[in-house]
Amino acid sequence: MSCRTEDLLEFLLTRRSIRQFKPDPVPDEILLKVLDLSRYAPSAGNRQPWVFIVVKDIEVKKKLAEIHRGATPLLGAPVGVVVACDKNASPVSYQVDCANATMYMLLAAHAFGLGAVWLQALRNVEDIQKLLGLPESLIPVAIVALGFPAEKPQARPRKPLEDVTYIDRYGNKLPT
C-alpha cells in the first residue's frame, strides 16, 4: 500500500472532533481494526502500557457521562473506548504513551470513515476506575466517543506558525 503525500496531508487536515453520531452501530470488524492500529502508537521503551476498555452498554456510557460533565458525546455514540495506562509499567511517561495511543485511535477511526472525539479523563480517575473495575495501577487517560459522524465540522482557525515556532530557544523567532 502506498500513500501519496498529498493524500496523507489531506487526511491529516480533514480529521475533526466529532460530537454528534448516527445511531448506526460500528461493525466489530472495523472497531477491532481501529483498536489494533492503536496498539502501534509509540511508547517509552516500547512498553505499550495501554489497555482499551470498549463500552457499548448505554448504562455504563450514561454513568461515564455523569462522572465527566464533558463526556456527553458518549450518550449519542454507539461506542466509547476508555484508554487507560499502567503507571507501574511506564511510571514516567504513561500519560504521554496513552495520549499517543489515543491519537492513533482518532486517526485510525478517521481512516475508516468513523468520527471520534477525545474526552480527557484525568480529572475523574478514581470514579472511572471504580465504575470500570480498573486496578489502581491503570489510570484512565482518555475516553473516546466513536461512531459514524452525524455532523461535518468546519476547520477552525489555527495560530500562525510564526506565533508558535522558535529556533534554539524560546523567543527567537524562526525566520519564515
Image: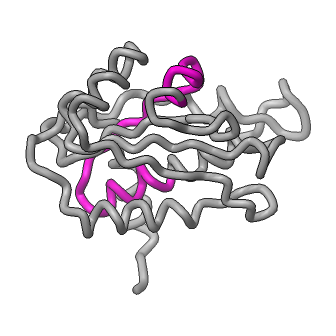
Number of marks in the image?
A: 0
Q: Is residue 77 visible?
A: yes
Q: Is residue 21 above or below residue 8?
A: above
Drawn side of residue 47 relative to residue 64, left or right: right
The quarter of the picture where residue 78 lies is: top left
Q: Nearer the viewer, residue 134 or 28?
A: 134
Q: Is residue 172 above or below residue 13?
A: above
For image coordinates 34% across by 15% down, the residue present is 66
Percent x, y for residue 143?
44, 35
For image coordinates 77% across by 51% down, the residue present is 89
Secondary structure mostly taken by the magenta-highlighted segment of the chain: helix
The quarter of the picture where residue 160 lies is: top right
For image coordinates 49% across by 60% down, the residue present is 38
Drawn side of residue 93 relative to residue 159, left or right: right
What is the quadrant of the C terminus in the image? top right
Percent x, y for residue 83?
51, 44
Q: Residue furthest right?
A: 168
Drawn side of residue 51 relative to residue 42, left or right: left
The quarter of the picture where residue 69 lies is: top left
Q: Is residue 71 above or below residue 108?
A: above
Q: How is the image coloured?
A: one colour
Per the rendered image, the range of residues in magenta is 104-129
For image coordinates 67% across by 49% down, the residue present is 97
Q: Is residue 16 visible?
A: no
Q: Is residue 157 above or below residue 7?
A: above
Q: Nearer the viewer, residue 49 or 135?
A: 135
Residue 128 lies in the magenta stretch? yes
Residue 34 lies in the magenta stretch? no
Percent x, y for residue 129?
54, 30
